[in-house]
């Protein structure tokens, strides 16, 4: 009998968009070696081509760049570009993968990214990255901040590749000797333990729909083309103009669902992101325009279902002034008056045919699966759905039909960036769960140069001022700020950069430190919240203590808030840089503190999310405490009978409960709550209401949510009015109320999208339609009505909506200011609603009314945990993540994570996804043998301290205590968070914070 091959502690990640990057970094930080394979010449995927991201309007490149740099500098991420997967053989734990790396014709280890070759190249080629709106050269870098920071040659366009003696200007220009036209394609084989597929998506080809005029009318563009029009790195430098004639548009239209929700062209799904990106583009276009710009969005249903999306929609309509036109667009033609404008023919909500002219029409195109992955999936035996997206295994979030191969991102279903990031972390967790015994067997440990001793040195400051594309540069005169910085005391070097966070600028900072003997570094750019760790890492790589770095935010505090006052914004930026220079002169090296790591985990909440997290943590070899305040496990899922895709939920929940209660690594506590918390990442001590103290290294909050109990529509007064969860039970039991009903009415948005709860509860539309279809199965003769404001069956749930209409379920739209009325009648209920087409009231004699009531946060419980773990809540009472786009399960508090309904409304599959994502992120902490505390703690001048104890009273981390013998305050460096509460309360000025002393703050004020 042959022995089973040993497992391999490496993972293959196919595709290097944000999903691939996130999965790679999570795995690398969790103890696995990663092969990140990308078919293009640089990593990044679609995000580098976007201008801003919704709903925060963060610069896409700004928030992505730190991850690009992290990927590039990580010793355990082997990035292989220009490469495709040919085959995967083997089994979970031991796969043999065949790769084909196409010749780049430029050696990335030699190329400096200087661009001299491209300047000399005579061949111009349509720039695919810029959506063919301008040209690039035959030797090119994919985009300005690309990693690898190296050029590549297009062999089909290069003159020398066609005829060796025809050219060679690039060879003459390249001083590094990096160009080699004789390179050939290479076949390589690697061994990995698991595989994650995250190849992203392709954009829909709008020319398939001739009636929109794309390709015929020059002023009809796609949404991706419009992103490049807006971008500072785009073909027009961020200046808003028509690509056809350069005219500044005064009126722009967006057409929704182009290549989505269209069964005639086999696109019967919703692409999920189009509504939100259209709103974002319309809003940002107005920001870019120095003149009044009219923007209009033509839509069928506005699908703003994500966290804070509904508020973004409301702001766009009521504050920004974006017009929303509910309609069906029939065609776009040229206006015919010589203006080049677009004439849109459409039917409004009442069916009236209308014409309107616009300077520019933007087609909100859908997401298609990548064609090359369809072919590869066939080779690998990976199951695809009818639209050729990967068919995820039910209720796994990331599984495929082939064990050991996982999926993340838009290849599994159209999805936005936060969901993609979540799924990537989930895939990392699931792929690592099967490889726990070989963790850290192939990884390398990063070594830093010896730290330069700057004690006694004259302060030599370097200042790097960022244009941030046009985020800063379009308002602030960045070169003049850099010029001003050169005049300031201690400054020996100052420069400006297009993107200071890019890989090449990171190298420039290190070069400047060496060349100019810098011992203080200042970056004036965007938020230190997202970028400071990256720049501090750059200092460490150059041999400087990372705390000799200062960052000033001239984006949020200058260009954004003073966008209409460029001169004042520039002067303010100069002041901020001056303040930073004066403060930096007083910065001193701070040593970090290394502490032992507790490798146990606490999961709070025993619903599906909490149990899923616990099971996955256990599979990765960690002990888990699972705490549930109810007497039984299961949470809200105990009341759900049917999954959105027909899954048997009771069986699924029962299996989960069995797993957690029989797992030796999981200790379950029911009927208890959290009563106190002490400690910090790696060393938490949590007391539960039974009095037991649990010691653990990380915490995952999975506390679930509540169902809103309506006070409207006679709920609680008439037993024929029920919620969807109550309807679920009736359907499962085939209750007479359902079986004998003649008319059943579902009412949407009950308690959601209201002033009290302005958010969308996300799951209600799909759940109502699923139940409506079940009603039709149980009682085919029943008339079923769905009263809605917008139908939000995103992604493949659109098929349920299509099926419901085909089966005769009647959909009637109502307005917020004209809600349905439910009244008691002799033999049941009377529901009155105004028909959105006829414009007249309709009366329905209903036997049963099902209310799609809101998903509510358990505010009291969440508030307690918020205080215990020092983590924030949003305005709706759900937990607030560290960054909505790129850290959707992390908190700002290290070692604490969230998942499930605690984060916000979502369906069961999405809860499973996020639960695994929280584990994926938690394991980046648990995999460490020690935990490093930054060291920016409080310190006490004993000569000034009177021992009054005020600092001890105000310290939220309980890190300060008064020594009863010496009568002075003593700080526990490991517990101290450096928040400054003690320093601000000390009447004697005896306590200060390392890296933020009173002297440094006074120096900043004196600089003004």
Image: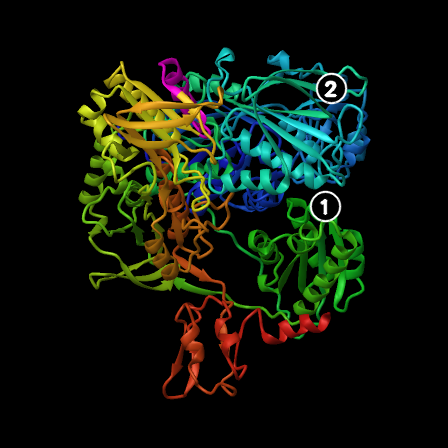
Q: Look at 68% across and 72% down and name the residue there.
A: 1005
State the extent of the magenta-drawn residues as a range: 789-810
Tell me residue 179's x, y (percent).
72, 31
Q: Nearer the viewer, residue 8 or 901?
A: 901
Q: Nearer the viewer, residue 678 or 166?
A: 678
Q: For the C terminus, which image quadrant?
A: bottom right
Instruction: Tell me where residue 728 appears, x and y as whole percent.
Output: 25, 30
* Image vertical order of residue 13 relative to residue 436, above or below: above
- Residue 559 colored in magenta in the image: no
Residue 156 location, quadrant: top right
Q: Which residue is mark 2?
A: 218
> Is residue 520 depicted above or below 39 in this figure?
below
Q: Label 1, on which residue?
A: 498
Classify mark 1: helix, strand or loop.
loop
Considering only vertical position in the picture, is 356 above or below 445?
above
Which residue is found at the position 45% from the left and 18% from the top? 388
Q: Quadrant of the N terminus?
A: top left
Total number of numbered discs in the rendering: 2
Q: Position of residue 938 (x, y in %)?
A: 49, 73
- Nearest to the eye among marks 1 and 2: give it: 2
Q: Mark 1 or mark 2: which comes first in sequence?
A: 2
Camera-nearest residue between 768 and 998: 768
Residue 197 shows in the view: yes
Decide: is 208 above or below 492: above
How crowded pointer 1 is (Cα within 10 Å; few <14, some 14-19, many 20+) is rated as many
Residue 449, percent from left and from top: 58, 58
Q: Secondary structure at mark 2?
A: loop
Q: CA distance from mark 1 to mark 2?
A: 31 Å
């Amino acid at each position: 009998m042959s022995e089973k091959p040993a497992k391999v502690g490496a993972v293959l990640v196919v595709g290097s968009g944000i999903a691939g990057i996130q999965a790679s970094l999570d795995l690398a930080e969790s103890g696995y070696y990663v092969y990140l394979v990308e078919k293009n010449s640089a990593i990044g995927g679609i995000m580098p081509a976007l201008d801003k991201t919704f709903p925060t309007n963060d610069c896409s490149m700004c928030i992505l760049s730190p991850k690009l740099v992290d990927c590039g500098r990580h010793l355990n991420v082997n990035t292989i570009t220009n490469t495709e997967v040919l085959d995967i053989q083997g089994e979970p734990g031991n796969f043999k993968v065949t790769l084909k790396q196409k010749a780049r014709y430029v050696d990335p280890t030699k190329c400096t990214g200087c661009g001299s070759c491209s300047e000399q190249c005579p061949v111009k080629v349509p720039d695919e990255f810029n959506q063919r709106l301008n040209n690039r050269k035959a030797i090119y870098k994919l985009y300005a901040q690309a990693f690898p920071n190296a050029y590549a040659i297009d062999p089909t366009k290069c003159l020398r590749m066609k005829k060796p003696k025809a050219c060679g200007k690039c060879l003459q220009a390249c001083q590094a000797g990096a160009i080699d036209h004789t390179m050939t394609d290479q076949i390589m084989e690697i061994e990995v333990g698991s595989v994650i597929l995250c190849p992203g998506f392709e954009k829909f080809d709008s020319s398939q729909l001739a009636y929109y005029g794309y390709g015929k009318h020059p002023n009809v563009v796609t949404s991706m083309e419009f992103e490049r029009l807006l971008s500072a790195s785009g073909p027009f430098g961020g200046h808003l103009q028509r690509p056809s004639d350069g005219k500044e548009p005064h009126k722009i239209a967006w057409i929704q669902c182009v290549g989505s929700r269209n069964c005639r062209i086999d696109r019967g799904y919703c692409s999920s992101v189009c509504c939100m990106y259209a709103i974002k583009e319309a809003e940002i276009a107005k920001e870019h325009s120095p003149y009044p710009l009219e923007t209009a969005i033509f839509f069928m249903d506005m699908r703003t279902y994500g966290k804070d999306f509904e508020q973004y929609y409301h702001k766009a309509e009521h504050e920004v002034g974006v017009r929303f036109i509910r309609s069906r667009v029939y065609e776009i033609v040229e206006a015919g008056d010589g203006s080049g404008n677009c004439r849109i023919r459409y039917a409004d909500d009442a069916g009236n045919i209308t014409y309107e002219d616009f300077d520019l029409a933007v087609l909100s195109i859908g997401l298609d699966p990548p064609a090359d992955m369809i072919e590869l999936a066939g080779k690998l035996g990976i199951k695809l759905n009818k639209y050729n997206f990967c068919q995820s295994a039910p209720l796994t979030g990331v599984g495929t039909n082939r064990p050991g191969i996982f999926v993340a991102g838009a290849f599994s279903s159209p999805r936005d960036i936060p969901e993609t990031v979540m799924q990537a972390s989930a895939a990392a967790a699931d792929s690592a769960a099967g490889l726990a015994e070989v963790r850290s067997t192939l990884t390398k440990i990063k070594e830093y140069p010896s730290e330069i001793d700057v004690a006694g040195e004259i302060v030599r400051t370097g200042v790097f001022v960022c244009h941030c594309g046009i985020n800063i540069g379009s308002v602030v005169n960045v070169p003049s700020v850099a010029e001003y910085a050169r005049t300031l005391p201690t400054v020996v070097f100052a420069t400006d950069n297009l993107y200071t966070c890019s890989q090449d600028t990171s190298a420039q900072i290190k070069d400047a430190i060496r060349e100019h003997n810098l011992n203080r570094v200042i970056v004036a750019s965007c938020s230190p919240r997202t970028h400071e760790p990256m720049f501090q890492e750059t200092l460490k790589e150059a041999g400087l203590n990372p705390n000799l770095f200062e960052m000033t935010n001239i984006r949020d505090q200058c260009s954004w808030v003073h966008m209409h006052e460029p001169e004042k914004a520039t002067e303010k930026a100069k002041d901020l840089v001056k303040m930073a220079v004066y403060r930096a002169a007083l910065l001193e090296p701070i040593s970090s503190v290394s502490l032992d790591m507790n490798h146990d985990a606490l999961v709070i909440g025993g619903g599906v999310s909490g149990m899923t997290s616990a099971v996955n943590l256990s599979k990765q070899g960690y002990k888990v405490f699972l705490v549930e305040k109810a007497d039984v496990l299961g949470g809200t899922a105990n009341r759900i009978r049917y999954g959105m895709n027909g899954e048997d939920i009771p069986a699924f929940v029962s299996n989960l409960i069995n797993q957690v209660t029989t797992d030796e690594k999981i200790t379950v506590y029911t009927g208890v709550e959290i009563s106190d918390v002490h400690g910090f990442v790696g060393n938490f001590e949590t007391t539960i209401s039974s009095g037991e103290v649990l010691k653990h290294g990380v915490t995952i909050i999975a506390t679930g949510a509540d169902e809103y109990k309506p006070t409207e529509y006679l709920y609680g007064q008439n037993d024929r009015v029920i919620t969807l969860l109550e309807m679920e039970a009736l359907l499962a039991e085939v209750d007479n109320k359902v079986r004998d009903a003649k008319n059943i009415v579902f009412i949407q948005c009950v308690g959601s999208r209201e002033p009290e709860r302005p958010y969308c509860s996300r799951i209600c539309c799909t759940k109502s339609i699923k139940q409506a279809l079940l009603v039709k199965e149980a009682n085919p003769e029943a008339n079923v009505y769905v009263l809605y404001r917008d139908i939000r069956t995103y992604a493949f749930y659109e098929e349920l909506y299509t099926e419901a209409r085909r089966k005769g379920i009647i959909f009637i739209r109502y307005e917020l200011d004209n809600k349905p009325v439910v009244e008691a009648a002799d033999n049941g209920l009377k529901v009155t609603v105004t028909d959105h087409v006829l414009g007249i009231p309709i009366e329905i004699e209903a036997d049963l009314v099902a209310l799609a009531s809101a998903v509510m946060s358990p505010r009291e419980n969440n508030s307690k945990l918020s205080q215990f773990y020092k983590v924030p809540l949003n305005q709706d009472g759900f937990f607030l993540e560290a960054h909505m786009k790129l850290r959707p399960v992390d908190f700002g508090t290290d070692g604490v994570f969230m998942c499930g309904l605690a984060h916000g409304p979502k369906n069961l599959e999405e809860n499973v996804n996020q639960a695994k994502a929280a584990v994926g992120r938690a394991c980046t902490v648990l995999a460490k043998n020690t935990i490093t505390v930054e060291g920016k703690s409080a310190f006490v001048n004993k000569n000034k301290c009177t021992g009054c104890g005020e600092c001890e009273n105000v310290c939220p981390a309980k890190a300060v205590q008064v020594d009863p013998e010496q009568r002075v305050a003593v700080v526990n460096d490991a517990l101290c968070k450096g928040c400054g509460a003690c320093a601000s309360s000390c009447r004697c000025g005896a306590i200060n914070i390392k890296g933020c002393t009173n002297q440094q703050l006074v120096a900043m004020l004196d600089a003004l």
